[in-house]
Image (spheres, rainbow, N blue to C red):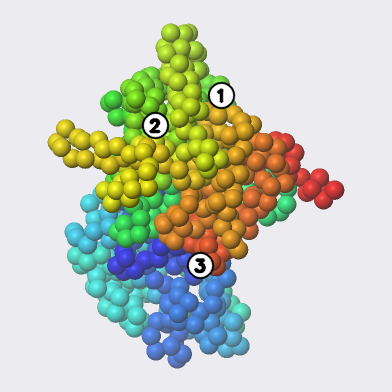
């Protein structure tokens, strides 16, 4: 399958923080990452179908709704096990599939159960077609049927996947296997330098009401021996053993977290699903946290999401700390030490190994958010050893932030905004730097370094003062989104004609940058000045007016929710889950609990059918519009629930009075 034909929107994810799989509601697997959850991705195409003797002329692919199959899908309660039931009007065999990765193992289980729903015996073949284009490339693959393992093994470089079952297969084909899988006739080729292969299992005279099972294992290793050992381990136990072990793992994971608060059932369900989802978004080996499972490999509509953003992660780890999952936060901040540049900065986004990912340039809020998040985490765990480990990075990071301050404005110099769309001295970014420097000063005081602490605190106070002095826009009753906004020359000329304050900066090579002195656009991120960074008090009248402007200008008609900013063009300018919850956070902070709960409920009402939170909701239909799941959305939900619970504003009995 060509990558550009894979869906942007998926329905479910499964994994164990080594494996991560994205799946459709039909049970079809579209992508599979291993041994890290961001890169590389290996699956080109996997299909599952039935060839029913005397009934079908070719394989009927039950992982597709296009062939007459109907599907019921959802997660097994309180787990990351994804279950799908497929039934067909004229094919008498129903199929249940269970997808999950075994905790701590390099084994992904795809367990299929086939039930004869008719009044007569039925014979059929189960066809499993798999194409692995490891590292997302068409080149240098080998597929081999290993008779000793009874497995199709896909090989490229250090990524080896052996696909088999504890049931002995009755047919196989390595290479160019789609035609044979589609006709139900595999030719027995045992090796080919192609990425695909197929297996089949035959069942004869399955009686009415009888169920037969095929647990398919995808065993991974960096060598053939490692993959073979993982496969042998999978086959050493009945499939029920792995299912029970996996279900128990996820239930214990939830038991170790702060329990869901006393609240409505839909809130409690989404609370637990959020915790389960955030764990899958945390890489087991490195501790990095990805924004979302990748869905746009070719950057056809965006710049990709399977990366670690320091800003997103600062919100995510704060949420994890609030629910008692601080070990994940600790591992993330230890990972940040691998991603910091020598000058003390953190770049826009990174791979799991700390290397720079594709980016649009420095976002000063990223590194500032990491420092802020480190202090939030330390304040929660009170672990002196953690403070000691991160101190060198804190010191370098804070010094870099100070060096980045524009002497003319007193704000951080131009960088990309948090949405990665424009270059300016952004008010949100300034508040993040204030938060980062304040956090660094607190770490310095822990070490008794009062002079260093005072210097960083003084720099933070200077930024705070300049936000108040230079960033208020009385005309709109809101803080400016930023200063020194870079625009195109036509935009610059138009602004000049309208009397706006402008300037031109010429680089050492003679290239001009056209600047508007003020960016007056209303943007949800302006709430960040106060919540969470505290550069302006939540009760400051200017903050209240800014929040009012945000609600007035950014609330989406009909479907509700809050969009990012005025005239947002991205994916049509829809309301986002995280932006709506951001406004909820502010309203909680100022005691507007009823309005905060309504915004929270909007997010709950717009989760997907599988209980996941997307990034955006279509502004016309109210349906999921983009990115499933978005880790930041789940984190903002957890934070809102936690904040409301702390002030006793979620209990069902209390709300009914």
Q: Secondary structure at mark 1?
A: helix
Front in this rendered view, residue 115 or 581: 581
**Mark 1 to mark 2: distance in Å?**
19 Å
Q: Residue at x 52, y 53 (%)?
A: 563
Which comes sooner in the sequence, label 1 or label 2?
A: 2
**Mark 3 to mark 1: distance in Å?**
41 Å
Q: Residue at x 40, y 82 (%)?
A: 59
Q: Secondary structure at mark 3?
A: loop
Q: Quadrant of residue 141?
A: bottom left
Which comes sooner in the sequence, label 3 or label 1?
A: 3
- Crowding at dot 3, Cα within 10 Å, few <14 / some 14-19 / many 20+, comes out as many
Q: Do labels 2 and 3 touch, CB within 8 Å?
A: no
* Residue under label 1: 379
**Picture coordinates of residue 365 (x, y %)?**
41, 34
The answer to whether 231 is drawn above or below residue 332 in the figure is: below
**Picture coordinates of residue 571 (x, y %)?**
42, 60
* Residue 25 badge: 3
**Mark 2 to mark 3: distance in Å?**
38 Å
**Picture coordinates of residue 404 (x, y %)?**
33, 26
Which comes sooner in the sequence, label 2 or label 3?
A: 3
- Crowding at dot 2, Cα within 10 Å, few <14 / some 14-19 / many 20+, comes out as many
* Residue under label 2: 367
Q: Is residue 80 left or right of residue 494?
A: right
Q: Would you say residue 328 is visible in this rendering?
A: no
* Residue 320 badge: none
């Amino acid at each position: 399958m060509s990558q550009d034909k894979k869906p942007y929107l998926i329905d479910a994810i499964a994994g164990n923080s080594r494996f991560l799989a994205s799946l459709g509601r039909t049970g079809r697997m579209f992508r599979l990452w291993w041994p890290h959850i961001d890169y590389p991705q290996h699956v080109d195409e996997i299909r599952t179908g039935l060839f029913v003797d005397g009934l079908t002329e070719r394989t009927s692919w039950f992982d597709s709704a296009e062939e007459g199959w109907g599907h019921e899908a959802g997660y097994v309660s309180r787990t990351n096990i994804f279950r799908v039931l497929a039934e067909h009007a004229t094919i008498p065999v129903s199929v249940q599939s269970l997808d999950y990765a075994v905790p701590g193992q390099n084994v992904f289980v795809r367990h299929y159960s086939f039930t004869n729903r008719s009044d007569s015996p039925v014979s059929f073949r189960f066809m499993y077609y798999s194409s692995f284009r490891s590292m997302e490339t068409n080149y240098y693959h080998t597929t081999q049927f290993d008779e000793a393992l009874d497995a199709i093994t896909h090989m490229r470089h250090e990524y080896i996947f052996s696909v088999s079952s504890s049931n002995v297969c009755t047919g196989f084909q390595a290479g160019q296997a789609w035609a044979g899988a589609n006709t139900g006739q595999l030719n027995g080729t045992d090796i080919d330098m192609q990425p695909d292969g197929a297996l089949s299992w035959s069942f004869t005279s399955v009686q009415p009401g009888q169920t037969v099972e095929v647990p398919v294992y995808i065993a991974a290793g960096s060598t053939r021996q490692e993959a073979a050992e993982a496969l042998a381990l999978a086959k050493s136990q009945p499939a029920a053993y792995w299912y029970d072990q996996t279900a128990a793992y996820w239930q214990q994971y939830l038991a170790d977290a702060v329990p869901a608060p006393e609240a409505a059932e839909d809130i409690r369900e989404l609370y637990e699903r959020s915790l389960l989802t955030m764990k899958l978004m945390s890489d087991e080996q490195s501790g990095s946290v990805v924004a979302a499972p990748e869905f746009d490999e070719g950057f056809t509509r965006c710049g990709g999401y399977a990366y670690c953003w320091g800003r997103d992660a600062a919100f995510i780890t704060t949420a994890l700390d609030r629910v008692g999952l601080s070990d994940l936060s600790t591992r993330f901040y230890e990972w940040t030490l691998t991603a910091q540049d020598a000058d003390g900065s953190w770049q826009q986004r990174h791979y799991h190994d700390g290397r720079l990912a594709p980016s649009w340039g420095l976002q000063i809020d990223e590194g500032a958010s990491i420092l802020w998040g480190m202090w939030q985490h330390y304040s929660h765990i009170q672990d002196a050893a953690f403070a000691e480990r991160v101190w060198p990075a804190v010191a370098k990071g804070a010094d870099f932030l100070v060096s980045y301050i524009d002497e003319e404005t007193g704000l951080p110099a131009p960088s990309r905004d948090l949405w990665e769309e424009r270059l300016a001295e952004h008010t949100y970014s300034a508040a993040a730097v204030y938060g980062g420097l304040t956090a660094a000063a607190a770490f310095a005081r822990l070490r008794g370094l009062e002079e260093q602490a005072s210097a960083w605190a003084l720099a933070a106070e200077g930024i705070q003062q300049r936000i108040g002095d230079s960033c208020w826009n009385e005309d709109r009753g809101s803080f400016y989104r930023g200063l020194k906004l870079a625009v195109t020359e036509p935009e610059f000329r138009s602004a000049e004609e309208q009397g706006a304050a402008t300037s031109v900066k010429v680089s050492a090579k003679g290239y001009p940058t056209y600047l508007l002195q003020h960016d007056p656009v209303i943007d949800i991120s302006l709430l960040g000045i106060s919540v969470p960074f505290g550069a302006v008090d939540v009760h400051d009248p200017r903050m209240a007016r800014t929040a009012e402007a945000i609600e007035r200008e950014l609330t989406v008609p009909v479907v509700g929710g809050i969009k990012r900013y005025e005239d947002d063009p991205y994916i049509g300018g829809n309301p986002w889950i995280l932006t709506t919850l951001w406004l909820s956070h502010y309203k909680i902070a100022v005691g507007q609990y009823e309005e905060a709960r309504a915004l929270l409920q909007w997010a709950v009402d717009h989760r997907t059918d599988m209980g996941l939170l997307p990034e955006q909701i279509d502004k016309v239909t109210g349906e999921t519009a983009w990115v499933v799941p978005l880790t930041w959305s789940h984190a903002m939900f957890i934070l809102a629930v936690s904040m409301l619970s702390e002030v006793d504003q979620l209990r069902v009995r209390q709300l009914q009075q």
